[in-house]
Amino acid sequence: MTLIIDGNHVAASVREQAKRSAQDYLQQTGKSIGLAVVLVGDDPASAVYVRMKEQDCAEVGIQTFDHRLSEETTQDELNQLIGKLNADESVHGILVQLPLPGHLDEEAAIAQISPEKDVDGFTAENLGRTLRGQNALRACTPLGVMRLLEHYDIDTCGKHAVVVGRSTIVGKPQSLLLLEKNATVTICHSRTADLPAVCRQADILVAAVGVAELLGADCIKPGAVVIDVGINRNKEGKLVGDVDFEAASSLAGAITPVPGGVGPMTRAMLIENTIQSALDA
Ligand code: NDP
């Protein structure tokens, strides 16, 4: 029987614990934990993500400071706002929702965020500290994947983990976290030769590509753990992952669905990072 990894369930238990931590913080300091949310422009998908993140915060008792900026916002205006939030003691975490409108420089915006408030774990400081195995605010999606593996007692030690995708926010930090847990890691990307043959070697396969249902049955080793980070719309407009769930689930030992797998865990790790950031302040 294939195990369906339930991200909603694990995320709910993370939020439950976070609620207790936020209450303790309030009792001990008389202050709420605060997350500033910056949304530039009116991308509908980003607006949905921001709303869900703010709902999670409300549920656990984290105060959110909502900053909606117009599509015409300049880099200077955005940088100034981030500077103000860096200096604001009631703000423990700063989330700048990506993607930014095309005329804005995402790298420059991320670089403005104080590493101590970088709850997405995207700054060079936090990524570098992760690379060095030091205490850091770690990128939420890879962290959420590791938490899922841990929750389901999926041992990574000595296993061959194949990560498809090498982005700075998912693929690369994911590979580092798997390596830290003693997996033997292979990273694939758009120039990888014979992708299915490499994927078939994976005891743990993490797909973070952004191409709907790219990885089919020919990519799955029987019994493998399949973690699908992708969020895509297929031709029919249905939300699907990077893995063909139907085909893969008949071979996999365990698999995450889309939606309901990694997505809720990314949001849960944002909450945890915000609490961490408040406790470390
Ligand atoms: P990017 O576009 O930044 O990176 C995609 C990676 O996939 C690149 O390294 C690219 O290779 C590789 N790639 C693209 N096409 C192929 C291919 N045909 N074969 C092999 N590799 C390929 O995406 P992200 O990492 O930001 O996101 C990946 C997916 O995860 C998206 O669907 C995104 O929506 C989703 N996502 C989900 C989250 C969640 O919470 N569940 C959070 C963040 C992202 P190359 O480097 O060579 O171009």
Image (spheres, helix red, strand yellow):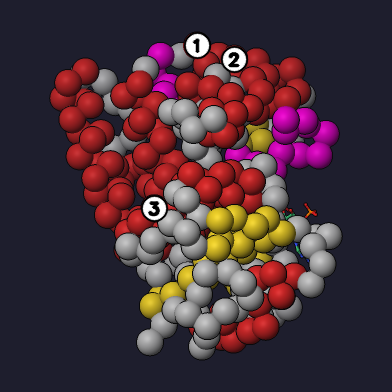
The residue indicated by pointer 1 is 87
Q: Amino acid at mark 3?
A: Arg
Span shown in magenta: 89-107
Q: Read off the residue under disc 2.
A: 83
* Residue that appears at 34% across and 42% down: 58
Q: Are marks 3 and 2 in contact (CB under 8 Å)?
A: no
- Tell me the quadrant of the picture where the N terminus can be found: bottom left
Mark 2: few, some, or many residues within 10 Å (few <14, many ≥20)? Answer: some
Of pointers 3 and 2, the one earlier in the residue sequence: 2
Quadrant assignment, res 128: top right
Quick one: label 1 or label 3, which is nearer the N terminus? 1
Q: Nearer the viewer, mark 3 or mark 2?
A: 3
Q: Name the kind of residue labelled 2 in the image.
A: Gly
Q: Nearer the viewer, residue 180 or 99?
A: 180
- Residue 224 appears in view: yes
Q: The C terminus appears in which quarter of the rendering?
A: top left
Relative to residue 224, is residue 44 depicted above or below? above
Q: Which residue is mark 3?
A: 147
Q: Nearer the viewer, residue 142 or 87?
A: 142
Query: Is residue 156 rendered to the left or right of residue 241?
Result: left
State the CA–CA distance, disc 2 to disc 1: 6 Å
Q: Identify the residue at horizontal 33%, vertical 64% (top origin).
A: 152
Query: At 24% from the left edge and 45% from the top edge, which residue is drawn?
Result: 17
